[in-house]
Amino acid sequence: MRSIRRQLLIWLLALVIVGVGFAGWLIYRQALAEANELFDYQLQQIAAALPSEPFSSVLSSRSESDEGVVIQIWNRNGALMYFSHPRVPLAPHAELGFSTEMTPRGEWRVYSAIVGDNVVQLAQPLSIRNRVAAGVAWRTLWPLVLLLPLLGLAIWVIVGLGLAPLQRVTRALDTRHPEALDPLPDRPLPQEVRPVVRALNALLSRLSAALDTQKAFVADAAHELRTPLAAVQIQAQLVARAQDDETRREALRDLHEGIARATRLAEQLLALARSEPDGKAAFASVDLAALLESCVRGSVLVAQQRGVDLGIEESEPATVNGDPDSLRVMFNNLIDNATKYTPRGGRVDVCLRLADGRPVVEISDTGPGIPQEERERVFDRFYRVGEGANRARTDVSGSGLGLAIVKRIAQQHGATVTLAESSAGGLKVAVTF
């Protein structure tokens, strides 16, 4: 596992080492330039001092004490009068002023001048100057080199202190109970850590909402499934206790109807679970006209059995981006509700039109409608409108989930669902994308 602390230590130490090395090179170059000036001045001073002393004493005093200085002296006729280090291979001629010569023993700095009637040549190996400059640079840098371990330890401690807020957040998350989804405090925290904590708090908020929704869904589903399953159990017992064929047939018919209701409820619950906000759906371009035609065609036979005239009144070309399976479930639920609650001889009209460039699907019926005060509540799970004088149909069975599924799928597709009274006095449901 990669450690931020270790990486910061390595990179910071590497930068420090590179910086110290570069500083050492600059110090060495500066010291070498100063050494060259100093030693060049020394060579000039030695040459200037030669005529002022007896010739023999000058030679005896300079040959041993000066820093590697080699002296050659010629007379005006070009005859070599003196060579302090015969084994040092220098040029046999003198070039007035300063010059640099390459010899088998390395580079030498040479200064030549006319002193009286003689030509004096003084030479000094550049290695001496390099050693002096390196010594100056090393004496300047060695305290920093010795401090590198302490600097590494300081970096390790400081980085650890800087990462301490992240460790506190980690410990706070590790010690939390799985059901504790309240937000983490984002103060006092460094500015760099707050976005992470806020993102975690947003995630915890979404998880809390999802868990609350799941718990409510499971509780409601368990409550709603209990009744049809108990009815199926009772109807199965009645089949077992039937004394004659007629009673048995009637009990079997009730049993089949109970099983159908339980199956329908389970299908609705599954559809509602798929339409939850965290459900994964592959969105694509959907032809609404073709989809509605398919839904209506699949419901025509059921509508005819219920004595309801179902058809498409108007259809304009329209396309939306969405999940075709979810949209099919939504429209099937709306059409099924409309045909269920419409009395025999009534009609259900499906309309697809464009309003300000936005597709609007309207499903109108001639049924009893929904009172104004209950139009908001019908979108709640398992809520059903109370049976009144105008809702006296005895063949209507439902789970109270149809419109809840419709609203959830509409929200998933960025659409709105509105309920209003149709022109025939029934209910008109409009889905606006």
Image (cartoon, rainbow, N blue to C red):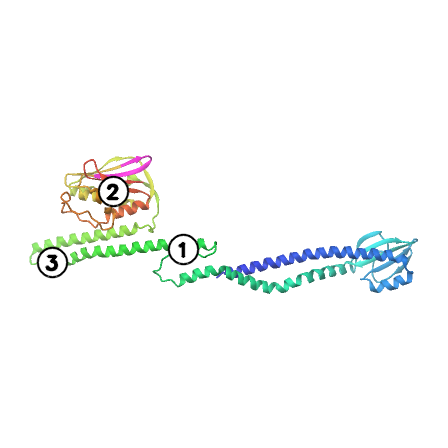
Question: Amino acid type of disc 3?
Answer: Leu
Picture residue at 32% right of the left edge, 54% below the top: 210
| Residue of label 3 | 238
The CA span between labels 2 and 1 is 43 Å
Q: Earlier in the sequence, mark 3 or mark 1?
A: 1
Percent of width and height locating residue 138: 69, 62
| Label 3: element kind | helix
Q: Nearer the viewer, mark 2 or mark 1?
A: 1
Residue 248 shown left or right of residue 186 in the figure: left
Q: Earlier in the sequence, mark 2 or mark 1?
A: 1
Total residue callouts: 3
Labels 3 and 2 touching (C-beta < 8 A): no
Residue furthest front in the image? 188
| Label 1: element kind | helix
Which stretch is magenta? 352-364
State the mark number for residue 295: 2
